[in-house]
Image (cartoon, rainbow, N blue to C red):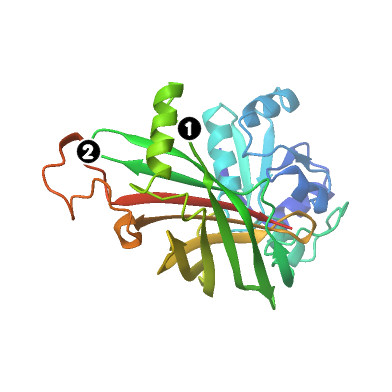
Amino acid sequence: MNSQISCKELYQWLTEEKDFTIIDVLPPEYYASRHIPGAVNVCVYEMTFLDSIREKITDKKRSIVVYDSSNRSKASLCAVEKLSAAGFAEVFELAGGIEEWEGSGYPVDVLGPDMDEEPVPSDGTHPIDCGTSRLEWIGRNVFKKHWGTIDISGGEIIVANGVVAGGSVTMDMRSIKDCDLADESLNALLIRHLTSDDFFDVENHPTASFQITQCVPEKGATPGMPNYLVKGMLTIKGIAQEVAVPAIIVPGESSGIHAQACFSIDRTQWNITYGSGKLFEKLGMHLVNDTISLELFISAR
């Protein structure tokens, strides 16, 4: 039997000391923050969820109540489905989760600080940690692709009133690497090609940069989706062009910031023309897609 149980019914079960198991299916840090008295913690997001359940509950006829953060999340429903499919006969989902439970005035065990569901970046200028930040690139043609990295050599993210307000990123074009060619000679040949004036002309343009001109928060963005539209000037080979980049920017450890952005550019706008079908004919095997895919990973202190 699988159904919902109300907060009132669960409270009656607890006061009547009914024999059952109540399971908090959230990650341990949320369980440690607050949980329903008597609940045990088995995170449904872990691959070992069912293994952990079987260690705690050997009788598949035992009544089980699972609960989540709120009715906006599907974690408890997911737990019900997994437990039911595994043969547990009496699984109940707490309607409204711990949010409704606590909001209705029922008791909670509080062990740690409240977990802020929507932290905001701390105000100030956050210098980029070049050691943990990077730019990844992918170049393609109709037959194959190459991918690699470019080091970040400097930059900052500026936050005002909890919102990203500006900043910049500098890339060291001399550091360009290819990560897919195992043959050392072919790898070196490709890097020589990319750093030459056929592509990035690194001798004359050793750095590229992105200067933020505007950051627009994306209303209603859920975690894991871009929460900013970042506009700015991308400079490659001394040519500055405006780009708009969807980005995820979130608070990091010790008041830092993490950012990730995935976007594509038309390389010909920066005079990177080798093998472009826009500008050359009869290229044969030398045809290269005009689109370059870029993914930026930033950690700032």
Is residue 9 placed above or below 27 in the rendered structure?
A: below
Q: Residue furthest front?
A: 204
Which one is in front, 116 or 283?
283
| Pointer 1 local density, CA inside 10 Å: few below 14, some 14–19, many at least 20 | few
Q: Position of residue 195 (x, y in %)?
A: 43, 44
Residue in the picture at 42% in, 37% down:
192
Which one is in front, 227 or 104?
227
What kind of residue is marked 1? Cys
In the displayed structure image, the side of residue 126 where residue 199 appears, left or right: left
What kind of residue is marked 2? His
Q: Residue furthest bottom?
A: 161
> Residue 269 appears in which quarter of the rendering?
bottom left
Which one is in front, 45 or 248?
248
Q: Position of residue 115 (x, y in %)?
A: 76, 58
> Residue 170 appears in which quarter of the rendering?
bottom right
Looking at the image, can residue 187 be seen? yes
Please identify, in this view, whether the residue under mark 1 or under mark 2 is nearer the observer: 2
Q: Which residue is mark 2?
A: 286
Q: Which numbered circle lies on residue 179? A: 1
Q: Quadrant of the C terminus?
A: bottom right
Q: Position of residue 165 (x, y in %)?
A: 61, 75
> Residue 223 appears in which quarter of the rendering?
bottom right
Element under disc 2: helix
| Pointer 2 local density, CA inside 10 Å: few below 14, some 14–19, many at least 20 | few
Earlier residue among tags 1 and 2: 1
